[in-house]
Image (cartoon, grey):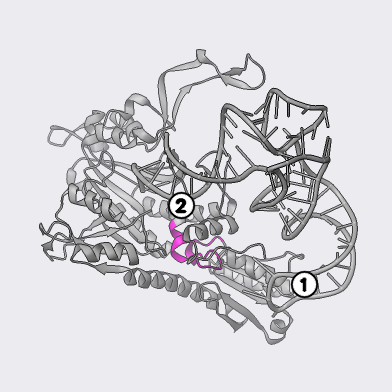
Amino acid sequence: MGKEITNRSEDYSQWYLDIVKKAGLADNSAVRGCMVIKPYGYAIWENMKAELDRMFKESGHVNAYFPLFIPKSFLSREADHVEGFAKECAVVTHHRLMNNPDGAGVVVDPEAKLEEELIVRPTSETIIWNTYRDWIQSYRDLPLLINQWANVVRWEMRTRPFLRTAEFLWQEGHTAHATREEAVREAHLIHDIYATFAEDFIGMPVLKGRKSENERFAGADDTLTIEALMQDARALQAGTSHFLGQNFAKAFDVRYLGEDNQEDFVWATSWGVSTRLVGGLIMTHSDDDGLVLPPRLAPTQVIIVPIPKPAPEITEVAEKIMAACRGLGIRIDLDTDMKKRPGFKFAEYEMKGVPVRLGIGKRDLESNQVEVARRDTKEKTSVPLEGIAHYLKDLLDEIQDNLFQKAQDFRAEKTTYVDDFNTFEEVIREKGGFVYAHWDGTKETELEIKDRTKATLRLIPLEDDNETGKCVLTGQPSERRVVFAKAY
RNA sequence: CGGGGUGUAGCGCAGCUCGGUAGCGCGCGUCGUUCGGGACGACGAGGUCGUAGGUUCAAAUCCUAUCACCCCGACCA
């Protein structure tokens, strides 16, 4: 008891907060809008990070680190960019405190005002492109394929753990290329990596497409996005990859001399995913009993619970199982807590979403078996000790597949094709999910739809299904269906 | 920034209307009995009542100011 979580059907948003709290992923902090990521939550992020980092490096990228602070003037170099971020910047104005002359505490020393204010980076395009100017002279310096793991700050009005926090952790890739084609290719490559990661590791199916001009990243010529559907039938933007054209090269005067001795501005991309992915993971798989982790990202994949409590003869068997499992790369642990009772532990590991639990008690020892409990289906079976490691390896794969499949089925169920506006409004209001509809391509229509239904244009699919039609709102001709949804 | 609400033990709350020197549940510690789905008993530790003023013999309670946080909107990875 005392660990009850709100049912999804009652209050989805409270359910989410309960999971974050009770699974020990994050706490609110003393700082408005900023969370403390607890060890268990951070371990999930570390696993994500490790895999993404591997994927970036395999595709030729290297890591570097740029400053947390950006001179205010840098931000305003690119007009669209500053417009997009100006309203949510944390600004450093002074560099020193002093004892309060009126009494206790310290105050900002007015003498220590900075000549130029510093902005805590909301994203690093400006400081990086200012640096790239010095690094790039010739086509031989290109491409420059750099990624940074960092924290950024965006002073959001309303925050939610992982989904939207004032400070968040992310990676931001910033690449420089000699040609437009190469930069476009890079943006698509990363887009593919993001989609692969989301589906194969988080087990979160995503739609791939491009953003409308209105939803595009501030300063980009083209924004590619992956969009996932959460269990409350709302969309989550899970990662974006931008083709920046020559916008930042022009703003920071980054030119290179080509093989043909012609000078030109450099072409750019930038791309990022954040700790928001942890929020997406939670909302994709978890249930009313707590977190459900996809095995590939679970800090602990298998937990052994001695029944009724740790004892030498149980530990001996557990050690053998663990050695065999670790040999196959399975992350497995033994619960050695003497105080808590088994029932409590079962509930606790379910809350934490550990994919598989092994129960070992006297009757298992006698029959040379263990009890195997899956978190995803709640099924329990007795499995012979002989060959248990391979059994578990296969089971973890099966759970990973099952979670992905379930999420895919859910998305399919919540995907609707709509051809008239009444139905559109009704589907958005009653059913939610992704709505494929025709759109006349104008910003006005997009905004009016948002205004009337709260649904936003999530993406324009990349592949043309060659189905022309009429805009669901205006009846004007449309070349393809686009995807609308209510989003986080 | 608009509208609503809350600050009392680690967490969740009662007490405030009608001032009298702080209580309940969970959690925490010790011991014992338990232990195959969130155990039980006994004893115990723990609170400048958000902060600063004021009224009063006396303030968690009344008054003033202030800060913080939460919820609903507008902004957003």
Q: What separation in Å lies between label 2 and label 1 (alpha carbons)? A: 38 Å
The N terminus of chain A: image quadrant: bottom right
Q: Quadrant of residue A85?
A: top left
Residue ranking furthest to the bottom: A367
Mark 2, other Cα within 10 Å: few <14 / some 14–19 / many ≥20: some
User: Residue at coordinates 27% horizontally, 32% vertically from top-left?
Assistant: A136
Q: Mark 2 or 1 closer to N-term? A: 2
**Magenta stretch in the rendered image:** A280-299
Q: Is residue A308 magenta?
A: no
Please state which of residues A445 and A150 is positioned toward the viewer in this rendering: A445
Percent of width and height locating residue A428 = 30, 62
Query: Which circle marks residue A312 in the picture?
Result: 1
Q: Tell me: A80 left or right of A274.
A: left
Q: Tell me: A142 left or right of A301.
A: left
Q: Quadrant of residue A132?
A: top left
- The chain under label 1 reads A
User: Residue at coordinates 42% horizontally, 72% vertically from top-left?
Assistant: A401
Mark 1, other Cα within 10 Å: few <14 / some 14–19 / many ≥20: few
In the displayed structure, A344 sits above or below B2; it is below
Amino acid under label 2? Lys
Residue at the disc numbered 2: A49
Amino acid under label 1? Pro
Q: Quadrant of residue A174?
A: top left
Please state which of residues A113 and A337 is positioned toward the viewer in this rendering: A113
- The chain under label 2 reads A
